[in-house]
Amino acid sequence: MKKVVLASGNKGKLKEFNEMFAEYSLSVVAQSEFQVPDVEETGTTFVENAIIKARHASAITGLPAIADDSGLEVDALDGAPGIYSARYAGVGAKDTNNWQKLLGALDGKTERSARFQCVLVYMRHAKDPTPIICQAAWEGRIGLEARGDNGHGYDPVFIAEGGELTAAEMSSDAKNAVSHRGKALKALLTEFRAKGVI
């Protein structure tokens, strides 16, 4: 079983990764299991932040690393919260605080189109000069209220394009088939096969 460190302590993300990699001999372990502290995300894009996180986790653990930098872009808010999605309501904010602030920012607005963005970076080692980078988006809109108990982050307020369910009302399998992270993970699996990682 090949071990890869996930440059995150997010249990929701870890669960999604392990579900997607279940059929392969690849075990994804959270960086928190190696006491890797969070690194400051000083990039101005999802790609930059994902590279920073992957390099940091790989340097400390000596293992290959996967980093995910993802977030929500809301058109009426000029793309905010964007790279600041996880800390939209402040550093250490809970998911609930973030989506409540978002609903407040959109109060009275009819333009509610939005998309989740996901950038995945895989680094073989901390000095990997050619990391694998995969990006995908999931189009939808922001609902008027929170619904559903599955998922994490902004899932309770994000309604996927072409449907009426929030991401938090979808089953894990249904969400993984269409979500930004699900699509980026499929692209990563394709790259892994092409490069002999799996």
Image: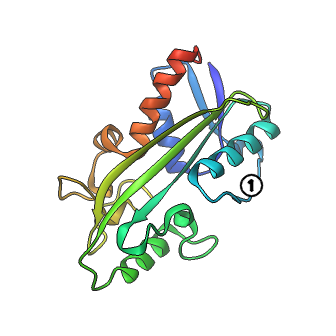
Left or right: 103 as drawn, with respect to 17: left
- Give the quarter of the image for residue 109: bottom left
- Kindly tell me whether residue 24 is visible in this rendering: yes
**Identity of the residue drawn at 59% across and 18% down:** 197
Left or right: 53 as drawn, with respect to 121: right
Nearest the eye: 156 or 194: 194
Q: Is residue 38 above or below residue 95?
A: above
Q: Is residue 100 above or below residue 136?
A: below
List x then y, in percent, for residue 136: 42, 43
Nearest the eye: 28 or 126: 126
Residue furthest bottom as drawn: 108
Amino acid marked by disc 1: Val
List x then y, in percent, for residue 179: 36, 45
Quarter holding the N terminus is top right
For label 1, the residue is 39
SS assignment at label 1: loop
Quarter holding the C terminus is top right
**Identity of the residue drawn at 42% across and 62% down:** 73
List x then y, in percent, for residue 60: 81, 40
- Give the quarter of the image for residue 2: top right
